[in-house]
Image (cartoon, rainbow, N blue to C red):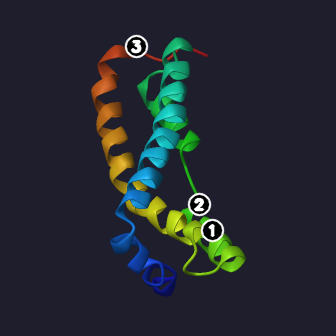
Amino acid sequence: MAILFALPGGALVHRPWAVVRIAVALLIYLAFPWSASMDFGYRSRLGSAHAVTLAFTAVGNNFELAIAVATGTFGAISGQALAGVVGPLIEVPALIALASGATSARRWFTSPVAR
């Protein structure tokens, strides 16, 4: 796994704007389904805990698999491998920020509907 991160590492340094473009796309990719799921949970009166579970399930990714497939298909120093490596580097801080947002959003949720 370390090799999969190390080989495209030079591209991270030499192509910073490519990394920024990938990062912005990934942030949008994570924020949209998370927000839509939180909104669905709110409108469905699921309660905060269920809405957050739904939202984080919606943005769950398999970046390790993406890195392996991109590397195997396009090569270890390809742009696709670079995008696969940037994914986990962006995902972790983004998910921490979304967890903070979920904590802040708790005040808008009521108790879940009785079943």
Under tag 2, what secondary structure? loop
Task: Report the amino acid beneath label 1.
Answer: Leu
> Which comes sooner in the sequence, label 2 or label 3?
2
Label 1–label 2 contact, CB within 8 A? yes
Q: Position of residue 100 (x, y in %)?
A: 29, 38
Q: How far is the residue under mark 1 from the one under mark 2?
A: 5 Å
Q: Is residue 42 left or right of residue 64?
A: left
- The residue tagged 1 is 65
Task: Report the amino acid beneath label 2.
Answer: Asn
Q: How far is the residue under mark 2 from the one under mark 3?
A: 32 Å
Q: How far is the residue under mark 3 from the one under mark 1?
A: 38 Å
Label 3–label 1 contact, CB within 8 A? no
**On residue 62, which mark appears?**
2
Task: Report the amino acid beneath label 3.
Answer: Thr
Q: Is residue 35 left or right of residue 74?
A: left
Q: Is residue 69 left or right of residue 17?
A: right
Q: Is residue 55 above or below residue 73?
A: above
**On residue 110, which mark appears?**
3
Residue drawn at 52 percent across, 42 percent down: 29
